[in-house]
Image: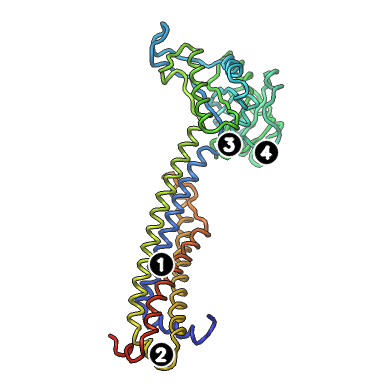
């Protein structure tokens, strides 16, 4: 492998056969480049699906109320349903140990100020359990607690970017911010994997919001997490039971798809899993097809190359070269060209993925990337295929008698 004379012969052969070297290298490099891009885009699509659910618990169920679409029990269609505090008690009494965490929500979009700085922010009124429903990460201070609910305290837990917008490089902890004209003490700062929008949220106690905004005991939404020991089928069935029981409580036709609606993360995760499997399968089939095309291309070129060099090999044999030396030279040359070309395709592919990354998010492709081990494995496969493709015709050529090789055309 490290014989200088052998390497000199290989480079001389490459320089004299530039076209076939370029064709072989291009076939391998292009195959690896396409393979890298395909797997990178596939991973980018998967990252998008994962990001969509990064800020919510995987076992969450979101419950919404709207207008009915069917008449029922003397009520006309179009009746507006309102979720209330007693709906939470109803769910606890009805389902008990099947519920892990629970919190209502009230939404507002209000002006928030601190000294001379101001911003418009989403305000969510919640209970302490909401921290686990949203996977909220407390960076400093604390989250809303039970005492805040009982006292109807004017306290706020603000997102990391709210702190940055209003307080610049200073800490917001224990400072007072003004939300819609009322002062709230900042008791915590949080981060959220859901992105910038989530980190510009402000959380306040649900009881405080109901008193200040005149909502009495009404809530906009109820969020629960089901027992994580449930399997997917049990979790989906549980979500449907919750929906039906609430529809029954609010006198809604059981066949009415409106009135009470739920979004079950178990169903969403199941659909995402199926979609990811489909994406992986498509990428794998296309990727393997690309590799097979590369292998066929390399094989055809190597068969042609060895045939073209039969006379040269005959001269080498006439000068004393052994069949093993001839086969070894061709194999070494093949490995060198395919490995170098494969690595070049890998580098170009990874570079293109990095360049594409900030430009393709609008197409639902997030951080397209590929494991180097996967692409290196594909490159090794091509190299081995090239080795086999070169070995068989080289062995045949090396076994030809010198006089026959010299007379070949």
Q: Earlier in the sequence, mark 4 or mark 2?
A: 4
Q: Counting other residues with Cα less than 10 Å from the Cα at mark 4, is it few (<14), some (14-19), or many (20 or more)?
A: few
Asked whether the viewer can see residue 166, the reply is: no
Judged by depth in the image, the label closer to the viewer, 1 or 2, is: 2
First in sequence: mark 4 vs mark 3: 4
Q: Nearer the viewer, mark 3 or mark 1?
A: 1
- For disc 4, the marked residue is 139
Mark 3 closeness class: few <14, some 14–19, many ≥20 residues within 10 Å? many
Q: Which one is closest to the eye, mark 3 or mark 2?
A: 2
Residue under circle 2? 317
Query: In percent of the image, x 42 and y 71: which residue is there?
Result: 386
Real-space CA distance between mark 4 and mark 3, rounded to the nearest whole angstrom: 12 Å
Q: Residue furthest bottom?
A: 319
Image quarter of residue 16: bottom left
Q: Position of residue 395 (x, y in %)?
A: 40, 80
User: Closer to the observer: label 4 or label 2?
Assistant: 2
The residue indicated by pointer 1 is 28
Which residue does the numbered mark 3 point to in the structure image?
Answer: 199
Against 287, residue 81 (above or below) is above
Q: Earlier in the sequence, mark 4 or mark 1?
A: 1
């Amino acid at each position: 492998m490290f014989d200088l004379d052998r390497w000199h012969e290989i480079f001389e052969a490459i320089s004299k056969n530039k076209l076939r070297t370029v064709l072989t290298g291009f076939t391998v490099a292009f195959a690896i480049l396409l393979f890298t891009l395909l797997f990178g885009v596939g991973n980018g699509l998967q990252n998008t699906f994962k990001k969509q659910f990064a800020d919510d618990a995987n076992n969450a169920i979101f419950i919404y109320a709207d207008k009915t679409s069917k008449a029922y029990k003397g009520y006309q269609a179009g009746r507006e349903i309102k979720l209330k505090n007693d709906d939470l008690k109803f769910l606890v009494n009805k389902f008990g140990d099947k519920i892990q965490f629970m919190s209502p929500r009230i939404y507002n979009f209000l002006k928030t100020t601190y000294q001379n700085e101001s911003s418009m922010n989403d305000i969510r009124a919640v209970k302490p359990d909401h921290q686990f429903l949203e996977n909220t990460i407390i960076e400093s201070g604390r989250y809303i607690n039970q005492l805040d609910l009982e006292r109807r305290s004017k306290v706020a837990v603000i997102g990391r970017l709210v702190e940055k917008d209003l307080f610049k490089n200073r800490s917001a902890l224990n400072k007072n911010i003004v939300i819609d004209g009322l002062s709230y003490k900042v008791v915590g700062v949080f981060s959220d994997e859901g992105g910038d929008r989530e980190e510009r949220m402000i959380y306040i106690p649900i009881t405080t919001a109901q008193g200040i905004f005149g909502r009495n005991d009404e809530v906009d939404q109820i969020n629960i997490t089901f027992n994580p020991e449930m399997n997917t089928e049990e979790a989906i069935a549980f979500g449907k039971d919750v929906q039906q029981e609430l529809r029954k409580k609010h006198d809604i036709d059981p066949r009415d798809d409106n009135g009470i609606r739920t979004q079950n993360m178990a169903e969403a995760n199941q659909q995402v899993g199926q979609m990811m499997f489909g994406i992986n399968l498509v990428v794998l089939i296309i990727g393997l097809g690309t590799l097979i095309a590369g292998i066929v291309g390399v094989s055809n070129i190597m068969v042609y190359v060895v045939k073209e060099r039969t006379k040269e090999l005959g001269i080498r044999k006439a000068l004393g070269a052994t069949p093993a030396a001839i086969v070894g030279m061709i194999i070494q040359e093949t490995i060198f060209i395919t490995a170098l070309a494969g690595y070049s395709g890998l580098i170009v592919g990874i570079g293109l993925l990095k360049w594409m990354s900030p430009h393709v998010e609008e197409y639902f492709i997030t951080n397209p990337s590929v494991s180097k081990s996967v692409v290196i494995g594909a490159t090794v496969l091509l190299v081995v295929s090239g080795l086999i493709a070169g070995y068989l015709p080289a062995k045949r050529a090396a076994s030809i008698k010198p006089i026959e090789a010299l007379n070949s055309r």
